[in-house]
């Protein structure tokens, strides 16, 4: 019988893996004007990889 040692066992996920975190990222390259590229994204861990979603800011006065 063969046994795959590279197989990861999937255990119960921690409670924090289902929560989206607001994260600031810095891309390791420069823009046209020579500044670093950075931005804010939503980030969540699915037990294996990080999942990222676009963060769009809104005006709180316009939302009311």
Image (cartoon, grey):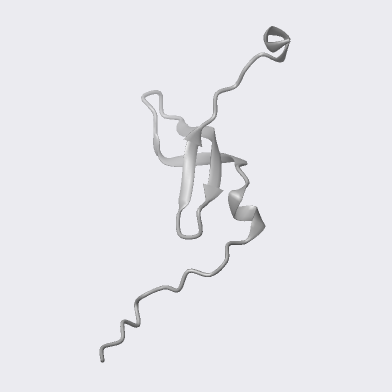
Can you say which quadrant of the picture contains the C terminus? Answer: top right
Can you say which quadrant of the picture contains the N terminus? Answer: bottom left
Does residue 44 appear left or right of residue 32 in this picture?
right
In the image, residue 55 above or below residue 17: above
| Residue 48 pos. (x, y %) | 46, 60
Count the numbered circles shown.
0
Outermost residue, top side: 62
Does residue 61 appear left or right of residue 33 in this picture?
right
In the image, residue 20 above or below residue 48: above
Outermost residue, left side: 1
| Residue 63 pos. (x, y %) | 68, 11
User: Which residue occupies the foreground of this view, 33 or 15?
Assistant: 15
Q: Residue at x 57, y 66 (%)?
A: 12
| Residue 13 pos. (x, y %) | 58, 62
Outermost residue, front side: 1
User: Which residue occupies the foreground of this view, 48 or 56?
Assistant: 48
Residue 17 picture quarter: bottom right
Residue 42 picture quarter: top right
In the image, residue 5 above or below residue 9: below
Residue 21 picture quarter: top right
Q: Residue at x 31, y 86 (%)?
A: 3
Q: Residue at x 46, y 34 (%)?
A: 36
User: Which residue occupies the foreground of this view, 26 or 5?
Assistant: 5
Q: Residue at x 46, y 30 (%)?
A: 35
| Residue 11 pos. (x, y %) | 53, 70
């Amino acid at each position: 019988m063969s046994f795959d040692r590279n197989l990861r066992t999937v255990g119960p996920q921690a409670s924090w893996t289902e929560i989206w975190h607001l994260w600031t990222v810095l891309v390791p390259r420069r823009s046209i004007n020579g500044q670093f590229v950075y931005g804010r994204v939503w980030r969540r861990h699915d037990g294996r990889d990080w999942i990222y979603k676009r963060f769009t800011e809104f005006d709180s006065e316009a939302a009311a």
